[in-house]
Amino acid sequence: MVRWTPLQHNGAWDDIYAQCDADAQATLDSRLDQLLERGHLARRPVSAPLEDGIFELRAKKARVLFYFGAERTIVLYLFMDLLKTRQKSRGKILKSLRKGDMTLSLGWGI
């Protein structure tokens, strides 16, 4: 099976590591590995659909928003700390993404 390729936008993955403890990092590593192996076939607890082609990588108290890009890429582009992010804020984030307010620049991986 061909694995998916991860790309990060504006250091999204790096930000996660800077804010998580060792246990959360281990969970993130495991979940990302499962996502890269299964791609769009990954389901809960690894991945969950949100809306408009936006998914979340689920790990402990953190979420990484992503979408499936061209040529088997998974673009990780936003980190959310569930302890600090309210549902209202999550709605605003998704609204901004739908409007295209958050731009994406590709070209580098994790």
Image (cartoon, helix red, strand yellow):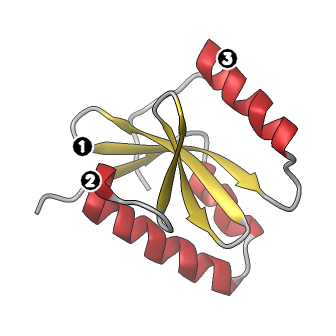
Residue extending farthest to the bottom is 23
Q: Which mark is residue 72?
A: 1
| Residue 102 seen in the figure | no
Instruction: Specify the quadrant that holds the N terminus.
Output: bottom left
Query: Local crowd at mark 1 within 10 Å, few (<14), some, or many (≥20)?
Result: some
Of labels 2 and 1, earlier in sequence is 2
Query: Local crowd at mark 3 within 10 Å, few (<14), some, or many (≥20)?
Result: few
Amino acid at the residue labelled 2: Trp
Amino acid at the residue labelled 1: Arg
Residue 57 horizontal/vertical position (percent): 53, 57
| Element marked by disc 1 | loop
- Estimate the spatial distance between the alpha carbons at disc 3 and disc 2, rounded to whole Å: 26 Å
Q: Which mark is residue 101?
A: 3
Residue drawn at (47%, 65%), measured in percent from left and top? 46
Residue drawn at (37%, 61%), measured in percent from left and top? 35
Amino acid at the residue labelled 3: Asp
Query: Local crowd at mark 2 within 10 Å, few (<14), some, or many (≥20)?
Result: some
Instruction: Specify the quadrant that holds the C terminus.
Output: bottom left
